[in-house]
Amino acid sequence: MNLRKVSLYLLCLTIGVLSCKKDDEPDPIVIEIRDRTEQQLADMDSLVKYLSNHYYNSSEIAAALPNAGINDIKITKLVSGASVPDGHTLLLDAVGAPKEVVYAETDYEYYVLKLNQGGGDSPTFADNVQILYEGFTLNNIVFDYKFYPNSNLFDLTSVISGWQNVIPDFNTSESFTENSDGTVSYNNSGLGVMFLPSGLAYFSNASGGIPAYSPLIFKFELLQMAENDHDGDGIPSYLEDVDGNDVLTDNTDDDTYRDNSGFIRPLYNYIDNDDDGDGILTKNEITISTINKPTKEEVKGVTLEYNQVLLNKIKKEQNGSYTGTIITFKDTDGVGPFDYLDKNY
């Protein structure tokens, strides 16, 4: 009898505790998924307002080029009724017309302040980059940064869409110098500021202190790049974009794979070492050669056959000459598609 009373008491106590926990827990935050086109219009309005009432230290930047860095860029809010100080430029006057891109079946516009082109190579949307950056909201709240270079590279296929659009329009550093204290100084790097609508950033996803539907600003300095070949098949990933839409979702043979969680995923060409599924590895259906010239311009100007492509990455040799890499795509029947995309060859 006493045991039954104790058991009943414990059961009631447990139910009470669980009930209290449930009542005390905050309700999950539900983010309404907005129409992308409508949100883009709102974001552009916010970006234009920001550009219209902020200026930057244009004279100081010009004097520091070609080796100005992100720490040299000073963006200041214009006091209401005041004029832009001498030696500074209103951002809206500096960025020019907005850039345009289609993403997620939506027409997007964004702004870029190009301060220095850079003297090195230009990465593609699929490459790895060494980059310094500072990201902040339109309220000038910094949410992320990287101020000193290290060995970490960013894979542009795994970052927000806006970076994939902006970074390839700049060049890496022309050269670098190893200092006696172990640091490295980069010379003539790509330098700029990007002003992105939320649809080219995190859109409805709040991330790391960034509220949902936040337009974002990034100062950035592009230092180095490494050409990406995700599947190691000899074809850089940017060339696996068969339809040329800057999205790596081409899947010539429509094959799949099972990921670590057990889900079936498409095996896109850029992660497939047999793109046409004919049992012959892609690397065995292409030929790779190099060409060396005194200048980079001469390498870029080399005459190519219809089935050849000069890779984007051109290497500067110690003797000052430049070496480019050429891929020759085998085309057995001479009418295409190339053998690595053709199951019949």
Image (spheres, rainbow, N blue to C red):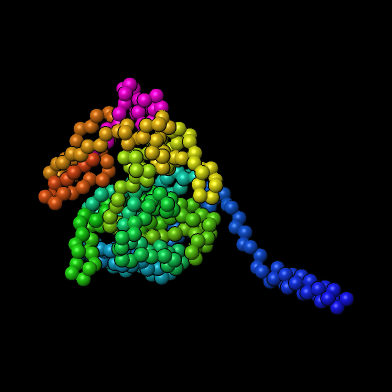
Residue situated in front as seen by the camera: 299 or 233: 233
Residue situated in front as seen by the camera: 225 or 107: 225
The answer to if 336 sits in the magenta stretch is yes
How far across and how far down the image is residue 152, in percent?
34, 59
Left or right of residue 277: residue 288 = left
Relative vertical location of residue 342 with respect to residue 124 in this rendering, above or below: above
Task: Give the quarter of the figure containing the C terminus.
Answer: top left
How far across and how far down the image is residue 85, in percent?
32, 69
- Taking the image as drawn, is residue 65 in sight? no
Residue situated in front as seen by the camera: 234 or 89: 234
How far across and how far down the image is residue 255, in percent?
48, 36
The answer to if 211 sits in the magenta stretch is no
The segment highlighted magenta reads 326-345
Relative vertical location of residue 135 with respect to residue 256 in this rendering, above or below: below
Q: Residue furthest bottom?
A: 2
Q: Which residue is drawn at 69% across and 71% down?
A: 21
User: What secondary structure characterizes most of the magenta part?
Assistant: loop
Relative vertical location of residue 159 with respect to residue 297 in this rendering, above or below: below
